[in-house]
Image (spheres, grey):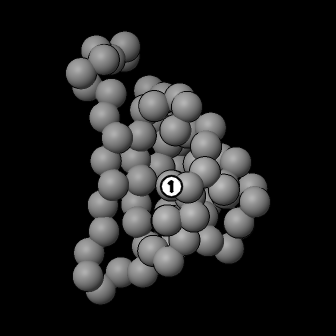
Amino acid sequence: MRRLKCEKETIILTNEDDGFYDVYTFNQSLQKRLRSFAEKYPDDCWLKGASEDGSETYMIRKGCIFEWFKGS
């Protein structure tokens, strides 16, 4: 099923009890950055799942998210 651009979301979820961010995205450049970060830091970031419609979900350890935002 083809999605409209307005349906291609990026969602970052967490809770106070969890030590991770759950990042769900359709954004291709963001997926590329997450993939690269996961290869560099496999204990702190990994692909949780991908769907046929083009979305990917990554898990990122909370203490590492700022390194990822800086572009490491």
Query: Image point 53% across, 29% down: which residue?
Result: 28
| Residue bearing mark 1 | 69
Q: Eyeballing the image, is 66 above or below 28?
A: below
Q: In the picture, which quadrant includes the C terminus?
A: bottom right
Q: Give the amino acid at mark 1.
A: Phe
Residue 15 placed where, x, y %? Answer: 26, 75
Q: Is residue 52 visible?
A: no
- Write the residue at 35% across / 81% down: 18
Give the percent coordinates (x, y) of residue 41.
Answer: 71, 66
Choose top left, top right, bottom left or bottom right for residue 55.
top left
Q: Residue 12: x, y in percent? A: 33, 55
Give the residue drawn at x 55%, y 55%: 70
Q: Nearer the viewer, residue 66 or 28?
A: 66
Relative vertical location of residue 30 with respect to residue 45 in this rendering, above or below: above
Q: Is residue 19 left or right of residue 43?
A: left
Q: Residue at x 26, y 82 (%)?
A: 16
Q: Is residue 64 left or right of residue 18?
A: right
